[in-house]
Image: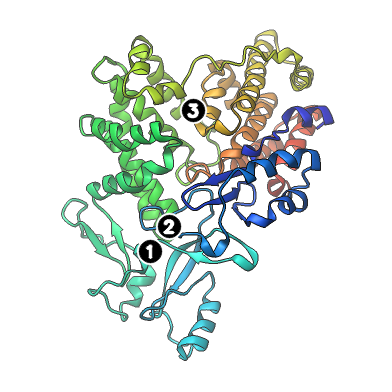
């Protein structure tokens, strides 16, 4: 990639790298996926990310405006707050000795803990610890693991000799989702298996991870629940989302929760599609609300393969994005009412005008590079017009997100390009046309700042991997391939080394 292209693509605002969590008073590096200690901001920017001194000033100024506490003073999350967004989840272990809350990521370290603290041999230790999901705010000398406190609360009904059940983590097949509320898996934790419990988890935890301000929190946490009680497809969408959230927070029970999510998605989508054929004032709010849950389920890397915007089958015409587009297009007659109503914050996220009229895409050096590159593919006149439109939309999307700065959300990234490219471009993408794949690779850069969202973790990286796989099996012009390699090396170095 040329220096001009890199300059055009570079996102240098602090919000692209840093995210402040006021609940815990920590500053998260979105690239490294851990909190930076208050006295190490400048060093982190310089040594880890090689940010030039002139650019570092804005990052340091951003950090100085955040109220940060020392690692030992960070308040750990309660059972309704785990997992903490933007932090990775690791599979680990919790010591089961009474009044011991020791956590670690390897069984060998746990055995050492037993010998040194509890003075017991490591043999036959399967019942002395249990698997739990772990997170940590800091690395290095401030590393301290934590987990969901509910997993550490002892249950009097459980016994240590149930070690086999503890290790398996599987629900009893004879139990009904509607007749049993909880099934204890071990002495400390329970498995959510009823629809009501999925709704309860959404109400107490999931909705908070989807909102980005007080207005959207009110909608996700209140209005959506009211609408879900009236429209079954929305209720199933909510439960599907809650199950995915549980899957991301409980790696050892991931498969179980994924099955629950898919079950609810299968029940929601057919009814939603039928509803979009007859949208009216009574159901328009539910249709709009469901669109967000549809996107979350589609983006989540646990349930979708790496393709997302790609397809191998002729009958798979980007199922999720077509459903979303059709649903939103049916809302046009009621858009003014939706914007002025209780779901106004939702409607605002799918704004039609990106308000970047001040930015002339034809003055952008990247567009010139893209249009010169597409010529190497020798498209016919119709395809060139399709590529041209998609490239211009991409440049506008980058300008829009730069303009949004710290206020940008994942919904902005989705609204800025995928919802605006033409069906003709999506058809070329489905055919693995090299330039169509290249534009998608550039779009993956826009998703990187939001990879801390639990439902987007790993998505952009998997897209790049899949695009590379398709490039390698197709005849690709050298110019197009070189630009893709530049993107992968600069923004997705781990994929480049894989």
Q: Are marks 1 and 2 in contact (CB under 8 Å)?
A: yes
Residue found at the far left of this picture = 179
Q: Earlier in the sequence, mark 1 or mark 3?
A: 1
Q: CA distance from mark 1 to mark 3?
A: 40 Å
420 left or right, relative to 372: left
**Whole-percent x, y for residue 146 in the image:** 47, 64
Q: Tell me if residue 403 comes above or below residue 181 in the rendering.
A: above
In the picture, residue 392 is in which quadrant? top right
Q: Residue at x 52, y 51 (%)?
A: 25
Considering the numbered disc 1 on the image, is that residue within a helix, a strand or a loop?
Answer: helix
Q: Earlier in the sequence, mark 1 or mark 2?
A: 2
Q: Residue at x 40, y 25 (%)?
A: 345
Considering the numbered disc 2 on the image, is that residue within a helix, a strand or a loop?
Answer: loop
88 left or right, relative to 210: right
Q: Tell us which disc is closer to us: 1 or 3.
A: 1
Q: Which residue is mark 2?
A: 77
Q: Which residue is mark 1?
A: 149
Q: Earlier in the sequence, mark 2 or mark 3?
A: 2
């Amino acid at each position: 990639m040329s220096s001009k292209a890199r300059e055009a693509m570079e996102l240098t605002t602090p919000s692209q790298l840093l995210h402040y969590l006021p609940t815990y008073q920590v500053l998260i590096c979105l690239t490294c996926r851990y909190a930076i200690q208050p006295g190490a901001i400048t060093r982190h920017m310089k040594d880890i990310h090689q940010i030039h001194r002139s650019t570092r000033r804005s990052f340091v100024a951003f950090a100085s405006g955040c109220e940060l506490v020392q690692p030992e003073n960070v308040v750990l999350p309660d059972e309704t707050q785990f997992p903490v967004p933007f932090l990775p989840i690791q599979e680990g272990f919790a010591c089961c000795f009474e009044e011991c809350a020791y956590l670690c990521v390897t069984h060998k370290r746990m055995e050492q803990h037993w010998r040194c603290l509890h003075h017991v041999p490591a043999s036959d230790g399967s019942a002395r610890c249990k698997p739990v999901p772990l997170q940590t705010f800091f690395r290095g000398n401030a590393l301290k693991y934590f987990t969901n406190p509910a997993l550490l609360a002892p249950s009097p009904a459980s016994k240590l000799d149930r070690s086999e059940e503890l290790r398996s983590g599987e629900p009893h097949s004879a139990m009904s989702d509607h007749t049993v509320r909880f099934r204890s898996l071990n002495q400390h934790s329970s498995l959510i298996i009823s629809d009501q419990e999925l709704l309860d988890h959404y109400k107490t935890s999931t909705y908070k991870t989807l909102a980005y301000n007080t207005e959207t929190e009110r909608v996700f946490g209140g209005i959506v629940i009211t609408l879900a009680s009236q429209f079954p497809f929305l209720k199933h969408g909510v439960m599907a989302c809650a199950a995915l959230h549980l899957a991301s927070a409980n790696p050892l029970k991931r498969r179980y929760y994924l099955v629950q999510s898919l079950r609810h998605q299968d029940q929601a989508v057919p009814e939603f599609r039928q509803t979009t054929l007859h949208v009216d004032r009574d159901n328009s709010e539910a249709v709009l609300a469901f669109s967000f849950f549809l996107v979350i389920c589609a983006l989540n890397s646990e349930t979708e393969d790496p393709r997302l915007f790609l397809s191998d089958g002729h009958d798979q015409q980007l199922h999720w994005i077509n459903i979303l587009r059709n649903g939103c297009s049916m809302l046009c007659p009621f858009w003014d009412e939706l914007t002025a109503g209780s779901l106004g914050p939702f409607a605002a996220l799918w704004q039609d005008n990106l308000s970047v009229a001040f930015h002339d895409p034809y003055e952008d050096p990247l567009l010139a590079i893209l249009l010169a590159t597409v010529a190497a593919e020798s498209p016919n006149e119709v395809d060139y017009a399709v590529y041209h439109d998609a490239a211009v939309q991409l440049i506008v999307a980058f300008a829009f997100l730069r303009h949004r700065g710290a206020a940008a959300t994942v919904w902005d990234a989705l609204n800025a390009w995928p919802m605006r490219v033409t069906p003709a471009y999506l058809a070329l993408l489905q055919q693995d046309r090299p330039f169509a794949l290249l534009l998608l690779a550039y779009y993956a850069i826009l998703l990187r700042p939001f990879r801390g969202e639990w439902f987007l973790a790993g998505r952009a990286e998997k897209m790049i991997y899949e695009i590379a796989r398709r490039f390698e099996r197709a005849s690709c012009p050298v110019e197009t391939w070189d630009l893709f390699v530049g993107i992968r090396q600069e923004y997705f170095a781990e994929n480049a080394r894989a």
